[in-house]
Amino acid sequence: MQTVWELSACCSARDGHRNLDDSLVQEVQAGTARAWLEEQGRAYMQLGTYQLEILVHPDWRGQGWGNWLLHRALSEAPRVTSWAYGDRAETVAWLERNQFVSHRVLSKMVFQQARPEPPDWPEGWSLRTYQPQDAEPWHQLHVSLQTDPSRAWSPQRLQRQLQKTSPERFWLLFQGQRMRGYLWLKENEIFLLALCPSSRGQGIGRRLLQWAMSQSRGTWGFCDQPSTLELYTRLGFTEVGRDRCLRHCE
């Protein structure tokens, strides 16, 4: 029997891109999201409050497994989103035939040049690593920065991520004593990067991204906002791929 990760690796090798959201996998493991794995490990579905992901072994595609899993999931959670990783045309077309519409496109941006020096910070600004007592103020800032606060991380999800990634790679940005932003690197991935609106337009976001670039070789991250894409490009990142999020319309 194949495990979920073996099935994921097999699909990734065929399709050429990632295909599972690590955070949703953690929700399944924590019991806050549901999952179903075919007894021989040839098909898999994981369903969170808002997100659905389906894997079907390449040799099993075209036999109706994807449609069966999709309809089963939609009967339980009709307002979900799903990702077409790699912006794969076949996946996008399949979801569109099932009343999904494009909602968001993430560009994967990679910095492949020599690491720059860490930036100098203006007077009064500082960066330090995350500490346990920062959980509540970080969560308040994180929620305030979301266009849809209901989809923000919960404190429990933060703790699960801290168990899997080093807090030494999680930095908080302060102006005086006030938390203004944060940066979290997962190996060389820019896992989280955010800055409060009142601090934008001052070169602070550029410095925060430059700090990330100075910490890892081959730094990369996903972004979808035009201003963020412009910043990444201006600092020497190049686009190497895209992921598309689609939302189901009842």
Image (cartoon, rainbow, N blue to C red):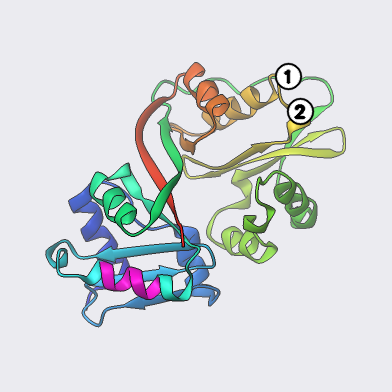
Residue 92 lies in the magenta stretch: no
Q: Is residue 68 left or right of residue 74?
A: left
Tag 1: residue type? Gln
Report whether residue 17 is seen: yes
Q: Secondary structure at mark 2?
A: helix
Residue at x 55% of width, y 74% of height: 32
**Residue located 70% across and 48% down the image:** 142
Q: Is residue 218 visible?
A: no
Q: Is residue 36 above or below residue 185?
A: below
Q: Which mark is residue 202?
A: 1
Q: Position of residue 205 (x, y in %)?
A: 65, 26
At 48% from the left and 23% from the top, the residue drawn is 115
Q: Nearer the viewer, residue 183 or 55?
A: 55
Q: Residue furthest top?
A: 234
Q: Main secondary structure of the magenta part?
A: helix
The part of the chain drawn in magenta is 67-73
Q: Position of residue 214 (x, y in %)?
A: 54, 27
Answer with left or right where residue 36 lies relative to residue 140: left
Residue at image mark 2: 199
Quadrant containing the N terminus in the rendered view: bottom left
